[in-house]
Amino acid sequence: MKWQVKMGWHNALFLHWKIAPDVLRPLLPPTVELDLFGDHAWLGIVAFEMHDVRRRWLPRVPGMLSFPEINVRTYCRHGGIDGIFFLSLDTPEFFTRTFGKRHFHLPYRKRRMDYEITANSSTRYRSYHPDGKLEFDACYEPADDGAEELTAFAPSDFIHWSSERYSLYSQTPDGTLMRGDVEHPPWPTSQVAFELATNHLLTSYMGPATTPDAAHYSTGVDTFAGGLVKP
């Protein structure tokens, strides 16, 4: 694959909720199949740090060395290739939003975010709606499988099913289905201890989002992304 964009996806919190398939199917392109695990569709929130983002042949841009991003996603397949379909992607970083919308047809949104690693090595993540209200507020850190502070346990087969996907699907303004592929090593994962104080990212799809049905953590991967192709 001839890559177009190099980036790191680091210090990632994965949260997942079960949801009825009929809720999500109308949101996908008609030729894309909603992928299920355990007879359920899944909504995911992934909060992470984008690191050292740059385009091929272009120098590094200081503002793109490190910035936060949160995406809301579900899982799909087309032509036998598993993938991710993004429902929203939020970041304060201008160039990523612009490039992602224009070249990958992704639903990026501008958000103000606070992202910090605290003195005890946990991560605090906040995102604000344009009206100034807090939209997402979480604190998290990696944990062992048997840790008492685990709020939601993710079995290894679900982690692999949801994490090891190397394609995204999107739609052009005229409705043409496109696929973008990425290359990266397998995600290094662990269980996660977290506190989800505020979450209004899923209100368009489900009632008040309570404790996730599954959650896990990854230190992250460095990724190479190719351009879009017609599948």
Image: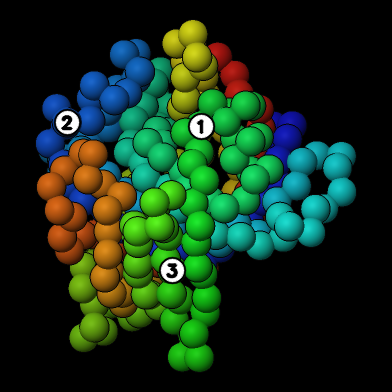
Q: Residue at x 24, y 21 (%)?
A: 26
Residue 23, which numbered label? Answer: 2
Are the residues flagged by discs 3 and 1 in contact, CB closer than 8 Å?
Answer: no
Look at label 3 and name its amino acid: Tyr
Closer to the chain start, of discs 2 and 3, is 2
Would residue 160 be visible to someone looking at this image? no
> Label 1 neighbourhood size at 10 Å, few (<14), some (14-19), many (20+)?
many
Cα–Cα gap, marks 2 and 1: 20 Å
Q: Is residue 170 above or below residue 50?
A: above
Q: Position of residue 54 (x, y in %)?
A: 75, 47
Total of numbered circles in the picture? Answer: 3
User: Quick check: 209 left or right of 176?
Assistant: left
Residue 125, which numbered label? Answer: 3
Would residue 61 be visible to someone looking at this image? yes
Q: Is residue 149 above or below residue 130?
A: below
| Residue at the disc numbered 1 | 106
Q: Is residue 231 above or below residue 82?
A: above
Closer to the chain start, of discs 2 and 1, is 2
Q: Position of residue 192 (x, y in %)?
A: 34, 73
Name the residue nearer the viewer: 74 or 138.
138
Look at label 1 and name its amino acid: Leu
Cα–Cα gap, marks 2 and 3: 28 Å
Q: Position of residue 195 (x, y in %)?
A: 28, 74
Name the residue nearer the viewer: 80 or 197.
197
Look at label 2 and name its amino acid: Val
Cα–Cα gap, marks 3 and 1: 22 Å
Q: Position of residue 65 (x, y in %)?
A: 72, 60
Q: Residue at x 12, y 36 (%)?
A: 20
Viewport quadrant of the N terminus: top right
Element marked by disc 1: loop
Element marked by disc 2: helix
